[in-house]
Amino acid sequence: MPASFRPALRAAPCACLLALVLPAAAQAPAAEALPEVTVSAERERETATSPVPGYTPRRAVSATKTDAALSETPQSITIVTRDLITDTGATGLQDALNYAAGVRSDAYGLDSRTDSARIRGTDAAEYLDGLRKHLSGYYTSNTRTDPYTLERIEVLRGPSAMLFGQGSVGGLVNMVSKRPLDEVQREVGVQFGSFNRQQLQADLTGPLTEDGQWLYRLVAVGRDSDTQVDYVRDDRKLVAPSLTWRPNASTSLTLQALWQEDKTGSTAQFFPWAGMVSDNPNGRIPTDTFIGEPGVDRYDSERRSFGWQLEHRFSDDWAVRQNLRYSENKVVYYSIYGDAFSSPGGWPADPVNQRVLGRIGWFQHNKLNQIAADQHVEGQFNTGTVRHRLLAGLDVSRATARTAQAYVPAGTAIPDIDVYDPVYTGFTVPDLAALPKNTLTQTGVYVQDQLRIADHWVVVAGLRHDRVNNKTVGAEDDKSSATTHRLGLLYEAANGLSPYLSYSEAFTPVAGRNCDGDLLQPQRGKQWEAGIKYLPPERQIALGAAVYDLREKSRSVSGTGPDCVQQVGETRTRGVELEAKATVMRDLDVVASYTYTDIDETLEAVPENQASVWTKYRFALGGTPGFSAGLGLRWLESFRNAPAPVTPSVTLLDALLAWENPTWRAALNVTNLADKTYVATCLGRGDCWYGARRTVNATVTYRF
C-alpha cells in the first residue's frame, strides 16, 4: 500500500463515525426506525514480495522458498521493509541492516567497494530475488546493490544450504527487488547531502494496458558524490526496468533487467593500529587521509543482468515456478594502500617516528559471468489429518571468472608516504598478467515438506544434495559434493505465540585459492536453534527470541595481507538474539534488538554484546498533519582480534525529521549524529578500519 494513501485510511474511521452519528443528531422521528449501517473494509492480502506499510510484515519467502507466514517458520528471520529503509535514510545495504538482530552491519567500517555485513559472526552471502548475486570473486567482482531498487531485505539467520546450497553458515541476506504493481505509483526525487552528494532518483510503476495484463516498473538512480576520504568518489548510474505479463489468473511472468555503473575508489586505506586505536606520537590519523595516488586509485564496476520469474498455477494447490538470471560484472580495481602488516603496531618503514608508511600496489581487472536458475514444484495436499505443503526443486549455477592482475610490494617501485602530511608522487600501473580462467559450477536437488498437524503443530523437513566443480584452466578439477538436512518443529498457538526448535546444515563452495596458492575447500556447518515468536493476530507487533549453537569447518579468515585468505578447522559460535517491532498507540513505531555472540577465538571477532533501537513518531504541527521524527541508537561493545589492541565500544545516534502528504515528501536524515570518530575493527594482521562519520542527507520526493 503506498504511503500516500495512509493519511486517507487513518481518516476513514472518523468519516465513518460521523456518517453514523450525524443522522442521530438530526433527531429523526422516534417512530421511524433508521436502517442499520454496517461498515467493513477488507485489508489487502500481504504476500512475501508485496509492499508492506510500516515495519512489521507477516510473511517471508527466504526461509522456505514459499510464501509462508513468519508465525509458522521455525527459524530466525528479520525483514527490513521499504518504509524502514526509507525512514532510516539507508544509502547502502549495510546501512539498511543497522537495526537487524544478529547482524554486525559495518563489519569493516566504511568501505566503498562492498557491503560487509556479518551474521552470527560469519560473512553474509548476498542473494537477490532468491538467486546468488555473485558466486565468486569476493568484492573484486561485485557491484553494490542500491537500496532504492529494493522492496524489502530478508535476513535469514543460520545455515540454509538445504534450500540455497550456497548460503553462508551464519545466514544470508536475500534482497527482494521492486516489482511492477497493478496501481499507478510514480515518484521522482532529489537528494543533497554530505560530501557533495547530489542524487536524482525515480520510481515509476503501473498498468500498461486497461485489462491489467501488462504491468511495468522503472527504477533509475543518478549520483555524483565524494566520500569522507579525500580523492575517493561515490558516483553511480543505474537503470532497472521490469515488465510483468499476466495473461490469466493462473500465469505470471516478470522480466527483470539492470544496468549499473559505479565510479569510486577504496575508502579502506589499511592504516596501522598505532594512530587508530593505540598511541602514536603524531596523534590520531585523520579520517579523510588518502595515501594512494590521485588519478590512479579506482574501483570502477559495471553490472548488467537480465532474468525472469515465472509462475503457473495448475490449481489452487499446485504450482510450478522458475527463477533465472544471467549477469555480467566487470571491475577495474587499482589500489595503493598502506603496508601495516609486517611489524607490531603496523609501522615497518618508520617504527620510531610512526608517520612514514610503506605502500603496496594491487591492480586487477576482473570479469565475472554468471547464470543461475532455480525451478521447483509446490503442491498442497492432505494425508488424513495432516496438511502437506511439498516443495521439490532443482537449482543450477555457473560462474566464470577471468582475472588479470599485478602486485607491487612495499619498498620497491612505490615510494613511502608521510601519512600525516601526504605528498603524492604519481605512479604508472604495470602490465597486468592474466590468471587462468576459473569456473565454478553447482547443481542441487532438494525436497521439502511443511506439515501442519492438528491445526497447531508445524513440522518443516528438508533434504538436499549438491555437486560442485571448481575448475581452473591448467589444473585438476576440484570436485566436491554434500547432502544437507533441515528439520524444524513449531507450535503455533491461537494467541500468536510460536515456540520452535530446529536443526540445519550448511555447505558453501568457495572459489579461489588461499595465501599458499591451494584451492579453498567448501565451508560446512551445522546448527541447533531454539526460539519463540509472538505475532498476535490483528496487531502490529512482532517479537522474537532465539538461542543457537553453531559449528563450522573451513571458515575463510584474513591471511597475512589484505588480498589473501586462509581457512581454519572446526570452530564454534553460540549466541542469543532478541528482536521487537511494534506500532504503539498508532503513531509510534519501534524497532529494537539485542545480540549476544560468543565466537571461537580463532575467528575474526565481533562485539560480544550489541544493541539497537529505532523509533519513529508521527504528529501534526500547527494543525498540519504528516510530520514525523525518528531517533535511533546503536551500541557496540568493545572486542579484540589478538594480537591487535582492543577495538573500543561505541554508541551512535541516528535521526530523522520528515513531512509528507499524498504528493510531496521532504526528509532530513542524519547518521552518526554526534559525529563520533570510531574504529569499526582492528585485525590481528596489523590494520584497522574507520567507521562512517556524520552524514546528513536531505531528500525531496514528488509523487504524481
Image: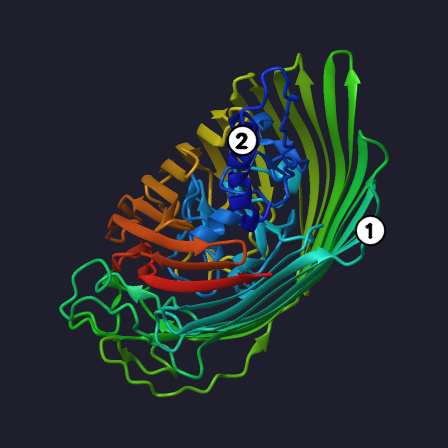
Compared with 203, 315 (above or below) is above
**Residue 168 visible in the snapshot:** no
Whether residues under marks 1 and 2 lie with C-beta atoms below 8 angstroms apart, the answer is: no
Amino acid bearing label 1 = Asp
Residue 25 on image: x %, y % = 51, 27
Q: In front here: 350 or 451?
A: 451
Quadrant the N terminus occupies:
top right
Q: Describe the element under mark 2 as helix, strand or loop.
A: helix
Residue 647 on image: x %, y % = 26, 51
Q: Residue at x 38, y 49 (%)?
A: 623
**Residue 11 visible in the snapshot:** yes
Compared with 327, 254 (above or below) is above
Q: Residue at x 42, y 55 (%)?
A: 659
- Position of 273 with respect to 458 (left or right) is left
Compared with 45, 32 (above or below) is above
Q: In front here: 35 or 240?
A: 35
Depth check, mark 1 against mark 2: the one in front is 2
- Position of 103 with respect to 238 (left or right) is left
Amino acid bearing label 2 = Leu
Q: In front here: 201 or 571?
A: 201
- Position of 469 with respect to 551 (left or right) is right
Quadrant the C terminus occupies:
bottom right
Identify the residue under disc 1. 211
Instruction: Mark 1 or mark 2: name the one nearer the start of the chain.
Output: 2
Residue 22, which numbered label? 2
Q: Describe the element under mark 1 as helix, strand or loop.
A: loop
Q: Residue at x 80, y 39 (%)?
A: 320
Q: Residue at x 29, y 85 (%)?
A: 423
Residue 86 on image: x %, y % = 48, 53
